[in-house]
Image (cartoon, rainbow, N blue to C red):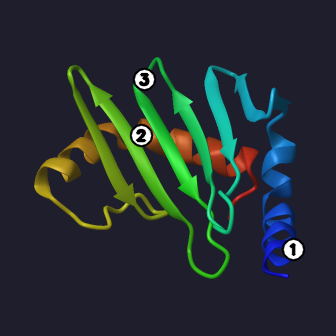
Amino acid sequence: MLNLVWYGVTAVEYKPFVSAVPDFDGVHSMMQDGFSYTVETPDYLSYTGRLMIADKQAGLAVGVYPHLFQDDTYEVWIQEGLNGYLLDVNNRLELLEPYDEQQDVLNRNKSEITRLMDQVKSVFSLD
């Protein structure tokens, strides 16, 4: 019974996401307008997958983790020269655990990250 509930819930929850990004050899991935989009459905008995958008030219990516019973969580990947940063943020691009260095990195890249957030929300119909 648990398997059926898990399958039904995740299939319904992720249907709009996998419909937005075509399946290519079992992977939901596409390139469009210079952005790379990926949908990872939840692993077995997990209810959280990941939606990704990346702009490789800008060295930025945003990961969205849709949750059933709580707010979605977000990660931002930023590549600046030889340094890479992974920032946990909310949907308003506020750091979940603020540190001065991370806040500076976020501030420097805020306009580009906002552009990615707007794009991911429009493609995946997020609130």
C-alpha gap between disc 1 and disc 3: 42 Å
Q: Total marks drawn?
A: 3
Q: Is disc 2 placed on a helix, strand or loop?
A: helix
- Relative to residue 124, is residue 78 depicted above or below? above
If you read the primary sequence from the N terminus, does the residue marked by circle 1 or circle 3 appear first?
1
Look at the image and tell me in which quarter the C terminus lies: bottom right
Q: Categorize mark 3 by other alpha carbons within 10 Å: few (<14), some (14-19), many (20+).
A: few
Q: Categorize mark 2 by other alpha carbons within 10 Å: few (<14), some (14-19), many (20+).
A: few
Q: Is disc 1 placed on a helix, strand or loop?
A: helix
Q: Which residue is under mark 1? A: 4
Residue 58 has which mark? 3
Residue 107 position within the rendered picture, expressed as x and y whole percent measured from the top left: 27, 46
Residue pictured at 73% horizontal, 27% vertical: 30
Report which quarter residue 7 is drawn in.
Answer: bottom right
Residue pictured at 46% horizontal, 17% vertical: 57
Specify the amino acid type for callout 3: Ala
Q: Which residue is under mark 2? A: 111
The answer to whether residue 39 is left or right of residue 111 is: right
The answer to whether residue 104 is left or right of residue 66 is: left
C-alpha gap between disc 2 and disc 3: 11 Å
The answer to whether residue 50 is left or right of residue 5 is: left
Q: Nearer the viewer, mark 1 or mark 3?
A: 1
Q: Nearer the viewer, mark 2 or mark 3?
A: 3
- Relative to residue 97, is residue 14 depicted above or below? above
If you read the primary sequence from the N terminus, does the residue marked by circle 2 or circle 3 appear first?
3
Specify the amino acid type for callout 2: Ser
Residue pictured at 83% horizontal, 33% vertical: 23
Q: Nearer the viewer, residue 83 or 35?
A: 83
Residue pictured at 87% horizontal, 74% vertical: 4
